Amino acid sequence: MSNKKENNVWYHGTPDVRELQQDGGFTQRHIDIEYVEDIDKWNNTQEALRLARENNNDKEYSSLLDSIKDLRKKASIRKPIFLTDIHSVAKTYADPQRAFDYQNSVEKVLKVSTKGNKGVTIIAPGSRFRFIDIKNVKQGFINAGVSEEKFDSIAAQLNFALGVEKGIKTNSIAAIADWLGFDYVDVIGVLDSYHGGSTKSTVRMVFDPNNISIVKEDGREALKESVREIIKESFTEDISQDAIAYHVSPINFDKFDFSKAGSRQGAHRKSAKDVGVFFTKDQWSIDWMKDVIARDGIPSYVYKCKLSYNKPYTLNDFYSMINKIYGDGYGEKLVNRVGFWNAYDQETSDILGDALEKGCDSIVFGDFIVMFEVSTVEILDIEVNDSE
């Protein structure tokens, strides 16, 4: 009996469907991942570091730290779109509290169909979706025609600091599949719910949005038009709002000190020109930052925070400013191509200059938020993650 899902009905839960419907469907996004090309050299250097530390050879240790940075490489992969075969699971992700503009958000569970001939099926009953047993993942890729040697090599390159004995994270699975040219990955029997729980489902990761078709509903065009009007109105005035978002750091503290913004070395290394503290609502970004910190062999701290802002600098502000510099449509194309975080990273100086000149107290680009004032951030919870 095959475990592969035969029907082609899937669901995608979104806390705010407005942007997706304005774009006419799903759009392609990319994320950067780190890997080590020469894993043997990496392991040898790690052993040399250990010996230098044990022998209190500070000079050798410092030299090795500098050299090991050159072994890390970056690659851009297509960010997968996540689907589930169970409507109730998708609905947990259609939580308006996850939306950056939750007061005006339009949460929705979309029914979709997919296409694509080259897929990987991973059987992982009872596993948490974001951390799956390496044996199950390997078997899925082997069944899909990937040699064991090839899989082991790529998995080691991606999990160069964490190892794969205990499992492999979703972003690494996605990277392997994208690198090897697969259209989708099915993970069967996993526990995947935004709020937790024990419901087992199949999660499908699709890499090309052109392979996803939204099942049409009656009045869809009328809904899209009304959504466009909501979007237009929501960005024509300053709006008072708050949000729940997360900050990841290698530092343990009980309150934020904004005077240190941009100064620390950690998950997101920025230059001194930066102002404010970064937050995100995107689970993928949270996991990525935790991984980066873990590679330095230290624990990470995930701060769940309530953010309050009265005058946010929005995407519409960014588009208006940047399009005057580079021409109509430049800002929209940039965000669609690289995402909210990377758009900010690429145009930081112009964005900060415009935001501060307008007297904004924050920057809100989708699930990426920058806060300027410590009084507007309340820590609700702290999650500690060991490096092992």
Image (spheres, helix red, strand yellow):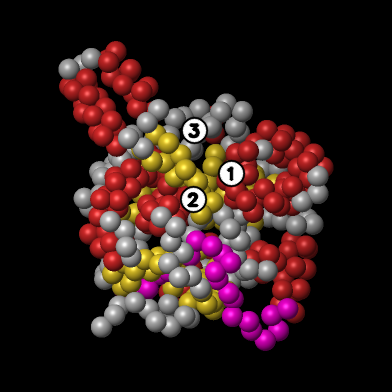
> In screen coordinates, is 270 left or right of 146?
right
Q: How many discs mark residues in the rendered view?
A: 3
Q: Which mark is residue 77?
A: 2
Q: Residue at x 75, y 79 (%)?
A: 222
Q: Which quarter of the rendered picture does the N terminus lie within?
A: bottom left
According to the image, label 3 marks what residue?
Answer: 269
Task: State the CA–CA distance, disc 1 to disc 3.
Answer: 13 Å
Q: Secondary structure at mark 3?
A: loop
Q: Secondary structure at mark 1?
A: helix
Circle 1 or circle 2, nearest the eye: 2
Answer with mark 1 or mark 3, whichever residue precedes in sequence: 3
As for residue 207 lying within the magenta part, the answer is yes
- The correct choice, above or below, for 55 with respect to 236 in the image is above
User: For the residue carrying disc 3, how many other residues have a C-alpha within 10 Å: few (<14), some (14-19), or many (20+)?
Assistant: few
> What amino acid type is highlighted by mark number 2?
Ile
According to the image, label 1 marks what residue?
Answer: 342
Task: State the CA–CA distance, disc 1 to disc 2.
Answer: 14 Å
- The correct choice, above or below, for 128 with respect to 246 in the image is below
For the record, the magenta segment spans 197-221
Q: Residue at x 61, y 28 (%)?
A: 273
Answer with mark 3 or mark 2, whichever residue precedes in sequence: 2
